[in-house]
Image (cartoon, helix red, strand yellow):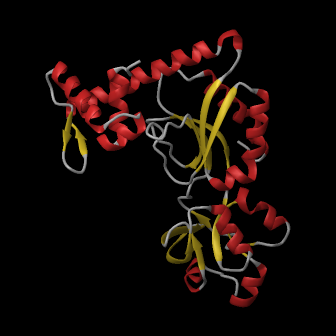
Amino acid sequence: MEQSPYLFFAEVVEAGSFATAARRLGMDRSNVSRRIKELEHTAGVQLLRRTTRKMVLTDLGAAFYEQCLAVRAEVEQAKSLLLSHGGVVRGALHVSCPPAIGRQYLVPLFEAFCRRYPAVSLQITLKSGALDLIEERIDVAIHFTNEPSPQHVARVLGHTQWIFCASPTYLAEHGTPQLPEDLAQLAWLGMRARMELQLRKESALHRVVLRSRVACPDYGLLGQLARDGLGVCLLPVYVASRDLAQGELVQVLADYQIEPTPGSTLYAITPPGIHSSPQVKAFVQFLAETVQAEFPR
């Protein structure tokens, strides 16, 4: 059965090119181009401007794409209603979360959810940073942030604090920082190659620029490197707590608060839409019930 023009157009736009769309849809590039031309001919307007390297939506094409997304959401909702007959939650569910929290805390929750809802097939993406939920077809993103996008639906799950850490061995060899400015004289393990941090102690504000000895967007890996004595890093408490308790990491600059933090509130973020599928509703509710022990509200 040929895909509806609305869903087809959304797929092409999200692919970014006819060639990529053809691979995703399992058809020839010429057929993709032909169907787009037929759609534009029927409408009597241009929806896409095509060059040798990329395609760009016209204003009307962008408006049409938004409507296509609404149609697709309604189609998915209809499928979910059919799949969830008899009160059974079933169907596919794509979840994304940062690697550190995924490995450290969410694996047992994923297992428990799968046992509670055996008819749900779960796809898990471990990825740091911002995500395009629509393009990557993510149903629920579990993400720490200070300000979730107003374009998404965000439910608060809990909170965390951020602390500076290093191993006792590293501090014994290189000294313990007393001021934020001292961080520039130590090996920094950061999310990016260059980081600007702002720390406050009472009314005093300190700004420091740090160049990372090791840069990685995975806080779990940064914590491991700090534990191994490679330098100082900024970690969320949920990553550092075990090593702090076991004495393998030591908090430094405890009197200073970083502002703004990289993200202190844990959210369950879902794409916009009037309706959520039963499996999305079940998963978000399950998270709200289970993560409070580690991330209190």
In this view, the residue in front, 44 or 201, is 44
In this view, the residue in front, 116 or 251, is 116
In this view, the residue in front, 219 or 111, is 111
Q: Residue at x 23, y 30 (%)?
A: 34
Residue 264 relative to residue 15: left or right: right
Q: Position of residue 102 (x, y in %)?
A: 68, 49
The quarter of the rendered structure image containing the C terminus is top right
Q: Residue at x 75, y 33 (%)?
A: 113
Q: Residue at x 55, y 81 (%)?
A: 181
The quarter of the rendered structure image containing the N terminus is top left
Outermost residue, top side:
86
Q: Compared to 123, does 285 lie above or below? A: above
Is residue 291 at least partly visible in the picture? yes
Query: Which of the 4 image quarters holds residue 288?
Result: top right
In this view, the residue in front, 61 or 158, is 61
Outermost residue, right side:
246
Q: Position of residue 59 (x, y in %)?
A: 21, 33
Is residue 252 at least partly visible in the picture? no
Residue 279 relative to residue 40: left or right: right
For the image, the number of numbered tags is 0
Residue 47 relative to residue 116: left or right: left
Q: Position of residue 137 (x, y in %)?
A: 50, 36
Q: Compared to 45, does 147 lie above or below? A: below
Outermost residue, left side:
44
Query: Which of the 4 image quarters holds residue 175?
Result: bottom right
Outermost residue, bottom side:
173
Q: Position of residue 77 (x, y in %)?
A: 52, 19
